[in-house]
Image (spheres, grey):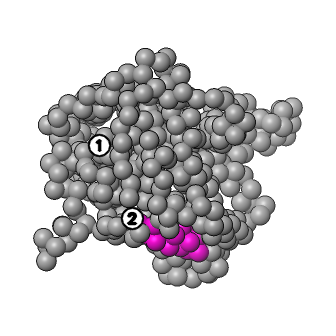
Amino acid sequence: MIVNASPKRPESFHVTSGMLAFTALMFLPAVLAFAVLISAWVVSDEVYAAERAVAAGSPTEIATWKTTVVGICPIH
Amino acid sequence: MLRAITARFGVALQYPEFRRLWMANASSQAASWALIVTRGWLIYRESGSSFLVGLATFAAMAPMLVVPPIIGVLADRIDRRRILLIAYTVDAAQSATLMVLALTGLLEVWMVLTLSLVNGISRATQLPTSQALAATLVPSNQLLNALSLNASTQHGSRLFGPGIVTPLLAIAGAPMAFGVSVVLYLIALRQARSLAPQPPEPSSGQSFIADFLGGLAYVYDRPVMRLMLLILVAHCGLTMAFESLLPSFAHNQLGAGDEGFGSLMMGVGSGAFVASLFVAGLQTHRGRGNALIVTGLLSGVGQVLLSLTDSLVVGIAAAAIMGGAQAAFMTIGQAVTQSIATNEFRGRVASINSFSLGGMMAMMNLFNGSIADEIGAQSLLLIYGMVFALVVAVTMIPPTGRQVYGRAAIPEAHLA
């Protein structure tokens, strides 16, 4: 019922809104996951230092997105 | 008896070229898992840091999100056997480096982390390449059997690799365990060397990026392949991103702590191993379609069952059902996409599979980990399981869905 044909020709394509949506769906999860992991890596020292400062009784200002991204990341 | 079992479940192994590739896969997968255990053990002993252990595992896994798009294009442009030879050589060399550094006492944590990344890049190269190569080494009617046997090496190696090195670590320490990985990678290299060269299809003459976009367009323009991939992405997001939920579930719902988490993961792993062997026995297009429906529904229902129990024994049984159904569904789904793909696109189809599915699992694991405390792991498992069972039921209705699930023939026009 299924046949493996092997025509040798380049695949031409036209960019449509459907194809863009499909491509985004394929790529976005990996890009988002990677962005979270890398940004958590970059800011984790700053967040941990702020947490230690709070524990020591001298609160330090830190951007909310930094604490959020470290909170989301499973290895930080 | 044994001959009958082999004829039914190991039929693709009758093809010498596939048998060599399968041996190479089995050895390299076992070596990878042996390395993961050994690196973790060593780093924790040296640093006492769980974070660094996690970082080493992350370094080995993260390339799966980045490398496959590049390798997919390469695997359609150059000899896939040559790509595997390079990957296995790199892996054997980095394992040997770890062994020598550990023997001489020069090994430091940053070196292990760096070589974890090298190992991760190499592994992300091997998986889509060997999937694309396997599809060319057996007739199309044995493709599901070949991919199932490949999948069984992935699940079996999770038991086999750590099973070899764990006692060695206690008896002889890390150098001997790294040595086992070297030997396993050398076996893989030898098997891959004995494969006949696999000359690629004639080049399209397009740029690297145009070839990559051509691969995406190829998948998008084939409705059965497109729908199958979308269902697989939904499957990964809704039922396979459970690793960040199970620790909390085992602790709060089952009252079983870390041991409960480990038991659930063993249930998932053993179910996956058995199911991938079961799928290898499917011989007809209709049987494959039926199994896709049943395992798709069970993947969701198994997760619902798990979410509803507060008994560890029942939870392990549900985890085994869930793990088995997930592994079988993924294997059959990948066989559907590879059976439609023509040879000059197989590498890109396998790579789109790898990074879209891996990316969705990574993102949903992050998402689940961040909301599990508010919503509860039990509720998330229940909702996701029901939603995925619904996805399977709904996607069976349209004509393309009927083709995906083997209820109707795939038009010839979709196969070119």
Residue B98 picture quarter = top left
* Residue B101 seen in render: no
1 or 2: mark nearer the eye: 2
Report the amino acid beneath label 1. Thr
Q: Nearer the viewer, residue B274 or B338?
A: B338
Tell me, yes or no, whether the highlighted magenta stretch contains residue B302.
yes
Identify the mark at residue B285; answer none if there is no mark.
2
Identify the mark at residue B136; answer none if there is no mark.
1
Q: Residues within 10 Å of mark 1 (few under 14, many from 20)?
A: some
Using residue B62 as the reference point, say whether residue B385 is left or right of it: right
Circles 1, 2 touching at the beta carbon (< 8 Å): no
Q: Residues within 10 Å of mark 2 (few under 14, many from 20)?
A: some
Using residue B226 as the reference point, say whether residue B115 is left or right of it: left
* Magenta part of the chain: B288-303
Tell me, yes or no, whether the highlighted magenta stretch contains residue B169.
no
Q: Which residue shows up at 14% across the image and 37% down it?
A: B194
| Secondary structure mostly seen in the magenta stretch | helix
The x, y position of residue B362, in whole percent, is 59, 46
Q: Which residue shows up at 57% across the image and 49% down it?
A: B223
- B73 in relation to B143, above or below: above
Report the amino acid beneath label 2. His
